[in-house]
């Protein structure tokens, strides 16, 4: 049987790293086993739909390169299918009409909580007389349809990640299958679609484990063979609490805005809870596909580490060719308001900053001095250790005189370093190069003054030194 898995998000907001990691695990599993990766939008809860959510889900998958083989399918377009199957359950006495009002249900729930009982439906409508049901339907009394869960017995299943799991039916509620608005709940629609779409493995978040007994009952009642299940543990913050926005629980597309490389984020997400049994930490997509298996997903929750993500992203940046990295950086230059008309100039900047960049959005802060002559900084920043204004002025004047002797044709990093290093040894390396770099960049940290001077060119470099001398 061909492997078929699905990513089935609800359009209730922008996808975050937790649910996109589930999509990634499904995608890796499909690609590893030569199977199909299917997208299904579970949009049957009209009250929770967020406009634009579907578009951002699909855009997130596209940006990450998680290509799908089928879909997207929309459950809201399949309502007649679910009604047909829920009627089959009614006819076989595996489901029943419930006419309880929301007020009655809430009152019963409050009573159970007060009595320290688990809040569950009290099955008041479960054994209504058939004639009474027919009369209420004829009178158009609002209703839902509930699953008739056995009142005794247990159900077991094997989870590919968690192992053997058992539930007592006494703890399983008579789940609503069809709501009063005619829309199915997740439980009915998910099971019917997984069967009709021939899903072989259901790989989803562990928050759905408690739903499995209801789903297995539905498979049994319909006479269908259930898929295999794998429930992925949660992602927690460094404090082992629920991941917060500050720690990384941001929409996936915000990672694009921040300048993360898609392959770096894929690499990072794959390692959140999956153990490849190797010390290797950087993997190509092909390597991830080859090594991936559900059995190597850890049973415990993963911990999100933004420093690790930044480290991996920095590696990907440094391993990207200069031309390709510059192309990726162009939108960030543009967003910062920098002139992007000269690609070669941008390429020189990226070459100089490549070793320092952790994410492409840092371009604005790291490289702004390449795009303006109005550099503002505290003059005290010019002082190296115990230097004073007189020392700095003297050394910058000497540097200027040396640089003035270099022609435009000889103006490159190698010649600049050769021209200044003898002087630096005489004055003190830090005493000369620190104020020179600050005068060119206005920053504590930047590429070497030789790299900066080469990119700025002879005229701008000398002019910036002169402007600094005026401030002293």
Image (spheres, grey):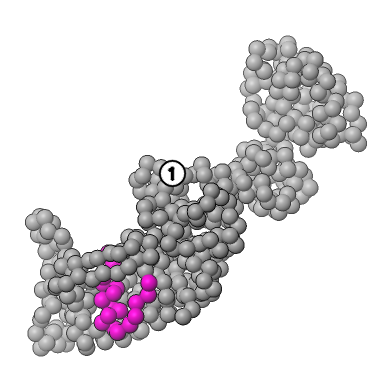
Identified at 22% across, 85% down, the residue is 90
The local secondary structure at tag 1 comes to helix
Whether 322 is among the magenta residues is: no
Identified at 47% across, 63% down, the residue is 293
Which corner quadrant of the image does residue 159 belong to?
A: bottom left
Q: Is residue 287 left or right of residue 15?
A: right
Q: Position of residue 144 (x, y in %)?
A: 22, 76
> Is residue 320 placed above or below 421 in the rendered structure?
below
User: Does any portion of residue 135 appear in the rendered image?
Assistant: no
Q: Nearer the viewer, residue 150 or 173?
A: 150
Main SS of residues in magenta: helix
- Local crowd at mark 1 within 10 Å, few (<14), some, or many (≥20)? few
Quadrant in which the C terminus is drawn? top right
Q: Magenta stretch: give its range.
A: 210-228
> Is residue 316 placed above or below 470 in the rendered structure?
below
Identified at 48% across, 73% down, the residue is 38
Q: Position of residue 85 (x, y in %)?
A: 30, 84
Q: Position of residue 199 (x, y in %)?
A: 42, 76
User: Does any portion of residue 465 appear in the rendered image?
Assistant: yes
Q: Position of residue 1 (x, y in %)?
A: 46, 80
Location of mark 1 (residue): 246
Which corner quadrant of the image does residue 12 belong to?
A: bottom left
Q: Is residue 102 left or right of residue 356?
A: left
Identified at 35% across, 84% down, the residue is 80
Seen as rendered, the residue at the extreme front is 277
Whether 221 is among the magenta residues is: yes
Q: Nearer the viewer, residue 421 or 329?
A: 421
């Amino acid at each position: 049987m061909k492997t078929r898995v699905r990513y089935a998000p609800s359009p209730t907001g922008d996808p975050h790293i937790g649910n996109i990691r589930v999509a990634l695990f499904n995608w890796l599993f499909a690609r590893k086993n030569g199977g199909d990766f299917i997208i299904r939008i579970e949009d049957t809860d009209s009250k929770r739909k967020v406009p634009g959510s579907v578009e951002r889900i699909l855009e997130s998958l596209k940006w990450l390169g998680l290509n799908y083989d089928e879909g997207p399918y929309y459950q809201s377009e399949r309502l007649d299918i679910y009604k047909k199957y829920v009627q089959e359950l009614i006819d076989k006495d595996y489901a029943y009409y419930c006419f309880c009002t929301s007020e009655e249900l809430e009152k019963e729930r409050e009573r159970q909580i007060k009595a320290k009982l688990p809040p569950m439906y009290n099955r008041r409508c479960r054994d209504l007389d058939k004639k009474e049901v027919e009369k209420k339907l004829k009178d158009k009394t609002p209703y839902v349809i509930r699953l008739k869960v056995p009142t005794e017995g247990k159900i077991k299943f094997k989870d590919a990640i968690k192992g053997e799991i058992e539930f007592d039916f006494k703890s399983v509620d008579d789940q609503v299958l069809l709501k009063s608005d005619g829309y199915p709940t997740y439980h009915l629609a998910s099971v019917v679609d997984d069967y009709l779409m021939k899903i072989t493995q259901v790989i989803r978040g562990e928050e759905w484990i408690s739903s499995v007994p209801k789903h297995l009952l539905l498979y049994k009642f319909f006479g269908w063979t259930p898929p295999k299940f794998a429930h992925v543990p949660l992602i927690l913050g460094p404090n082992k609490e629920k991941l917060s926005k500050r720690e990384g629980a941001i929409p996936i597309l915000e990672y694009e805005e921040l300048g993360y490389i898609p392959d770096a984020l894929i690499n990072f997400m794959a390692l959140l809870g999956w153990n490849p049994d190797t010390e290797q930490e950087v993997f190509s997509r092909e390597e991830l596909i080859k090594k991936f298996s559900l059995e190597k997903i850890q049973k415990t929750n993963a911990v999100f580490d933004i420093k690790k993500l930044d480290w991996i992203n920095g590696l990907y940046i440094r391993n990207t060719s200069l031309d390709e990295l510059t192309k990726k950086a162009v939108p960030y230059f543009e967003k910062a308001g920098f002139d992007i008309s000269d690609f070669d100039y941008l390429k020189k900047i990226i070459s100089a900053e490549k070793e320092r960049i952790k994410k492409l959005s840092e371009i604005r802060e790291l490289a702004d001095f390449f795009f303006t002559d109005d550099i503002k900084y505290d003059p005290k920043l010019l002082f190296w250790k115990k230097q004073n204004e007189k020392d700095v002025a003297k050394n910058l004047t000497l540097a200027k005189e040396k640089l003035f002797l270099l022609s435009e044709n000889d103006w490159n990093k190698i010649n600049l370093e050769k021209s200044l290093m003898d002087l630096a040894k005489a004055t003190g390396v830090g005493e000369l190069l620190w104020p020179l770099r600050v005068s060119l960049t206005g920053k504590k940290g930047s590429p070497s003054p030789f790299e900066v001077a080469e990119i700025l060119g002879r005229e701008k470099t000398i002019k910036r030194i002169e402007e600094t001398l005026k401030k002293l």
